[in-house]
Amino acid sequence: MFTSPKNYRRFSLILLALFGFLPSVVAQSTRVSGRVVDAESNEPIPFVNVFFANTTIGASTDANGFFSFGRFSPGKYELTVTYVGYETYQQALDFTLQREQEVQVAIRILPKKLTELIVKPDTLGRARNYREFKRLFLGETANARRCEILNPKDIHLFRDLETNSLYAHTLAPIQIENKALGYRLYYYLVQFEVNYKTGMSLIFGIPQYLQMKPENAADSIRWVRERKRAYKGSVLHFMRLIQANSLQQEGFEVRVIREHENKSRMDQERINVNLQRLTKLALEGNAISATSWIIDSLAFYRNEDRKSKVIRVLEPNLLKGHELFGEKQDSVVRYVGTLDIRYVREKRELNYIPPYGEKDVRQHSQLNFLEPVRLFGNGFFDPQRAVILERYWAWSEKIADMLPLDYLPPKD
């Protein structure tokens, strides 16, 4: 997941299959089964954790290494296998046509020396680095304040002063208790890197969801309500409605943003040549009048350099969903470009700081499809790196507000 550490304006989703349309009736015939063995000895491994990434669906192997679970919606899933001392294993499985599948999983022992992972000692400022990690990882929403990381000592933080970057490593999954939504997560962090020079960060990992047990009836009622609230207006909600062709009916105002060349902007080569020439003159100049002229000219060309190379024009027509598929209507989003998205049934959270000058209190986001994307029945999409979010979603779609892929909202 790429994001700006300062304003969360952009991020790209990686691995976390957060989106998609799920049928109202869960298919009963789907099932995956198999056996987990040691890759070297071919001996079965008991009590291994086997699950679909970003879902509550999974099981453990029995004493002979066998596992089996079913009753999930058709679609594509990342079968994930984790076991202490072994490398994490993943395999994509598509249940769109073949509803029952059997797999043989061979996992390898972790090398004694992790040559690819250099864990440096925590730098000074551990408390500050940890606060920054939580802000980027959990988010800043109301739900984030009700999330707790249960094993913070397993998170190893390092700030590189030369590159002005923050890194995080873990040798155990991050355990998160989300009291707002009633989930316990095990997050297998693969990479966390924030570069403050470029304003971008990379967060990459594998989440596993478990239902928390309510202490009383009030907890159950609250979790149902808060999950539904988190779902409404979310990316998960939006992606499901693309296939259902009901974006407008469910409160989304979606328009295409067309990009045109900004013809009022000066040619970039001309800007660069003049900036270089005037900067050199400014360093060599002595006369006050000449210096004043140079400063004014530098300001002019710097202003030209700051101008956007493209002008974004908002199309007036509202989309329902299927327009994004094109003529074939085969669940492949062929539209490549940016969408302007407003969810009109819920206001943005008070903690969110909108772009300067925006007065609309509704949730206003933008989504960019970098290339065609195939949507599966359960919401898994390929390729995973093909989506960039901006504005409100880039701020709100963090761990504290994410729902598992198998979540279905209660009927109104």
Image: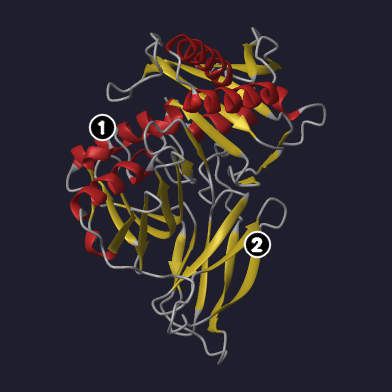
User: Which structural element holds mark 1?
Assistant: loop
User: Counting other residues with Cα less than 10 Å from the Cα at mark 1, is it few (<14), some (14-19), or many (20 or more)?
Assistant: some
In the picture, measured across the screen, residue 216 lies left or right of residue 31, that is: left
Looking at the image, which is closer to me, 89 or 285? 285
Looking at the image, which is closer to me, 131 or 160? 160
In the picture, measured across the screen, residue 73 lies left or right of residue 215, that is: right
Which residue occupies 58% across, 42% down? Answer: 379
Kindly indicate whether the residue at mark 1 contacts the one at mark 2 (C-beta within 8 angstroms).
no
The residue that disc 1 covers is 142
Which residue occupies 58% across, 44% down? Answer: 378
Give x and y (percent) for residue 204. Answer: 47, 53
Which residue occupies 32% across, 24% down? Answer: 352
Q: What residue type is labelled 1?
A: Ala
Give x and y (percent) for residue 406. Answer: 48, 46
Q: Earlier in the sequence, mark 2 or mark 1?
A: 2
The residue that disc 2 covers is 100
Q: Quadrant of residue 362?
A: top left
Residue 295 against residue 283 in the figure, above or below = above
In the picture, measured across the screen, residue 258 lies left or right of residue 77, that is: right
Q: Which of marks 2 and 1 is in front?
A: 1
Q: Can residue 408 be seen in this view?
A: yes
